[in-house]
Amino acid sequence: MEYDFDFSVFDEKEAPKIKNTLKKIDFKDIIIFENEDYILINKPPYLSSLDERTQDKHQSILRLAKEYSHDAQLCHRLDKETSGVLAIAKNPAAYRNLAMQFEAREVAKRYHAISNGVHDFEGVSVYLPIAQLRDGTGVRIDREKGKIAETIFNTLKAYRSYTLVECMPITGRMHQIRVHLQCLKASIVSDPMYGGDDIYLSQIKSKKFNLKNGTEEIPLIRRVALHAHSLTFRLLNGDAITVEAPYPKDFSVVVKQLDKFG
């Protein structure tokens, strides 16, 4: 499966040419685990979990899932820009089983984020309450009226100016990881809502970067650099399972460039 972003201004050897559009999704192509009760997928970026409130011009995970399995229900959600592992129940019993685990905070969710700045996190816990903004588009830290929220952070790899961070949300509040990283002065790349700056190849390559005449450099990734990497929960028979989702192309490009030059 391919994700389209336009890196045509970069050296052709450095980054693929991708357009900023989402191709028609074949649901089977994004399944990474399936049994009689659950489907786990690697959600592409830019694809909504639920049907959007505006005119139905776009695909949604729920719609695709129900076309594939009539009784499908999403067990949780990912933001539209966020990629990664998403669990879908194929029957009511499976849905109840996982819903109870989410309610009891027994599901282990691990996200990977690319953060601005260099950070050394080792089991750093951010325990700060979150409240939604009035317009519902974002959140803020609110110690008086906010809902309890906790996230644990670990540094996976630090580069010269960026850090690959593992994020483990204990609770499941809207934009929790994003606002908690902002509190640590480690805002996620390409997340202007919470202070995250774009990342450019010129910043990574430094003096080795040459931009073609008459072209304008564009960011390496044009969405919040956040990926739901793995999900651990118990199946109906009690067995624990961990499902991992590979990075999509845009996220992978950034990590590869950081590994090479960062």
Image (cartoon, grey):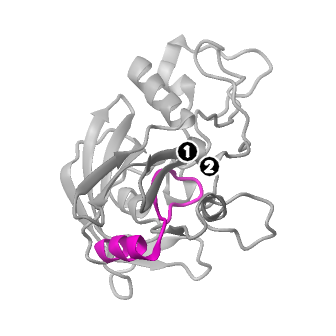
Q: Give the quadrant of the N terminus.
A: top right
Judge whether 102 appears above or below 47 on screen: below
Q: Is residue 86 visible?
A: no
Q: Give the quadrant of the C terminus.
A: top left
Between 20 and 192, the one lying in front of the other is: 20
Residue denoted by label 2: 27
How would you rate the neighbour count of disc 1 (Cα within 10 Å): few for under 14, some for 14-19, many for 20 or more?
some
Judge whether 6 appears above or below 236 on screen: above
88 in magenta:
yes
Judge whether 259 appears above or below 183 on screen: above
Q: Quadrant of residue 137?
A: bottom right
Cβ atoms at labels 2 and 1 below 8 Å apart: yes
Residue plotted at (56% across, 31% down): 200
SS at circle 2: helix
Residue denoted by label 1: 30
Residue plotted at (42% across, 59% down): 36
Query: Label 1 is placed on what type of residue?
Result: Ile
Residues rendered magenta in the picture: 77-101
Between 214 and 19, the one lying in front of the other is: 19
Q: Quadrant of residue 37?
A: bottom left
